[in-house]
Amino acid sequence: MNEKTILEVKDLDISFRTNAGIIHAIRGVNIDLQKGETVAIVGESGSGKSVTMKAVAGLMDANATVNRGQVLYRCAEDGKEEVIDLLTLSKKELRRRINGRHISMVFQDPMTSLDPTMPVGKQIMEGMLLHGGMNAAQAKARALELMNLVGITDAEHRMKYYPHQFSGGMRQRVVIAIALSGDPDILICDEPTTALDVTIQAKILELIKDIQNRMGLSVIYITHDLGVVAKVADYVNVMYAGKIVEVGNVNEIFYDPKHPYTWGLLSAMPDLDTDDDRLYSIPGSPPNLLHEPVGDAFAARNAYAMRIDEKAEPPMFKISDTHYAATWLLHPDAPKVEMPPELKARLERARKEAEKYI
Amino acid sequence: MTKYIFKRVILAVITLLIIVFVLFVLVRVMPGNPFPSERMSAEQIANKRIELGLDKPVLVQFWDYLTKLLHGDFGKGTSLYNGAPIKTVLSTCVSNSFRIGGLAILIGTAVGLLLGITAALNRGRFLDGFCTVFSIIGVCVPSYVFLIFLQYYFSYRIPFFPYFFDPGRFLFSAVLPSVSLSLFSMSTVARFTRNEMVEVMDSDYVRLAESKGIYGPRLVRRHVLRNALIPIVTVIAPLIVDLLTGALVVEKIYGINGIGKLMVDAISGEGVDYNYVLALGILYSSLYIGIMLVVDVLYGILDPRIRVSAKGDA
């Protein structure tokens, strides 16, 4: 783990006990997060994005078992730095030391993520009073400051409001204020804008970005919205069936994707300039992880699948220092396959569009 | 909040008035009358009707009844207890039923809540299963079966508690009927509490509270219990009315002179006793309305979504 890495998920493997059997949801995931940077995890529903981040935040469900792996966190406390494996901490230690103070989370649906019976001010102050060693007056002052920071005006008055007195966008601001209340190093945003309308989405994303710059936060976004990724991320991890299938910086993923699944995701993005009258979608659905997939889990939905895809799982092939993809197409012996021409044209258009603004 | 309570009270009073009127008319329309006709001549009955004011138009009768009622007078029995004032008879029965019922509620809710919370906090483990089995038994087996069972073991095998109700040793002799009466509400409360708590513990806001480092008893107290209690209050309320108004069979078996027994006497004695039926009906419905009113107010206290309107200030 190098000096600048604040969080490293190493070969994480998680399964769930359910009535139907054991679901092998996370199958060896590696994710790096550098200090001050933003990493996005994208993938379809059920690909394991949320589960991975819940493991990082210590919020795993009771029926989850970690089979192997580490979640290394560079914990800076009282001027000392040490690397801790978060998976070895007990629930109590996690809550006391890590949650809120080092790693915070913003959840998907602001309508359900605030306690309906507690005024928002109190909810913001709760963590500070418990762990922050502040007295009531200090906590209140800090809460007011945070509410102003997240753009809630008339904070003094609105502290006494209950969640139902706020709109969705305002509630998400409160949730962000709560997440920031313990002065964390890492902010995990689990689809923070999915439940909001489009105009509010952009504002919330800008807010998070702004706060990130001001407070020097490292941010992890979980999302299936590539538009969000393009706006906020430095690095992108594409996840499929409990594995990272492609990782790279945002330009590599958007302009030079290598994995057929990433091609599919990008093609499935709505676009105004295309001549197609139908929106592309990846055929089929993700595999059921009750049964361990044989070979490449994406093979059945992959138009470019080769015979080897049905037999062996592809390793991560290196494309550049930051860009890796797990597809047999990158093997030196594989036939040269380019991304679909429509997608290529589309990405080219997007690149030109982007250049106009630089 | 004051406005909210005021509105509820007004609504409660109106509801009660309507109920009294409907009861009053229904009793008179129903088949049966207060006179054991085989023992009274037509003339006697006619005289009695005049004496009781039953010859007047119903609306006039109702007005008379209502004015008396507002002075706290339930009138006299039309056939029961030789026309003794209802108030006196009722107060003995009510005090017996209420005290035993009250004790049952106390035991039922306290133990029920405790069981439910324990089960929820130990979800999927032995205690949870134990609580589920216990609740199912408690809901399925009628309370008088428990009473007979308890009598057998704690009065006969171990002669500790009395066989029958003894007003002189109230608390002591109330234990067995109260415990057996409390089992149903105990089980209902336990099951409901467990399910509500489990649901709240899975909610996003509890996840958020955890993500800011709240854990253990503090999490349960501040975020889980309060939210889970709101619906629990609604379940407890009707149970309270049921328990307070007496349990027919338990009162009969244990020889308790209570409301349940009185109700049966009023309907199935020699002729229907209009005034007793009315008095008991009014008692039952005002209790129900009163407790629902308390629930509404409690709801307001527990749930800010009701107390504080969406736009307005607290």
Image: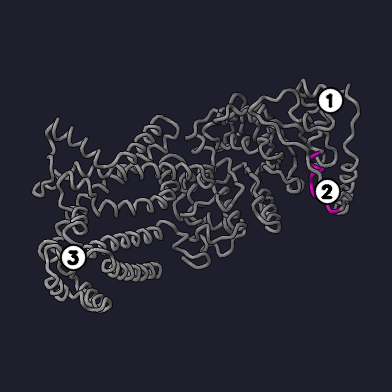
Taking the image as shown, residue A21 lies to the left or right of residue A328, namely left
Magenta residues (range): A264-272
Q: Position of residue A235 (x, y in %)?
A: 75, 39
Whether residue B199 is visible? yes
Q: Are marks 1 and 3 on the same chain?
A: no
Q: Are marks 2 and 3 in contact (CB under 8 Å)?
A: no
Residue in the picture at 19% in, 70% down? B72
Tell me which residue sits at (24%, 38%) in the image.
Answer: B146
Q: Which mark is residue A306?
A: 1
Q: Along the polypeptide, which appears first: circle 2 or circle 1?
A: 2
Q: Check the residue under mark 2 and report the chain it is in.
A: A
State which mark lies toward you, 1 or 3.
3
Q: Which residue is more in the foreground, B253 or A170?
A: B253
Amino acid carrying label 3: it is Pro
Using the numbered discs, state the Cα–Cα distance from disc 1 to disc 3 in whole angstroms.
94 Å
Asked whether residue B114 appears in the rendered view, the answer is: no
- The chain that hosts pointer 3 is B
Q: Amino acid at mark 2?
A: Arg
Residue tagged 2: A278
In this figure, which residue is indicated by the disc labeled 3? Answer: B34
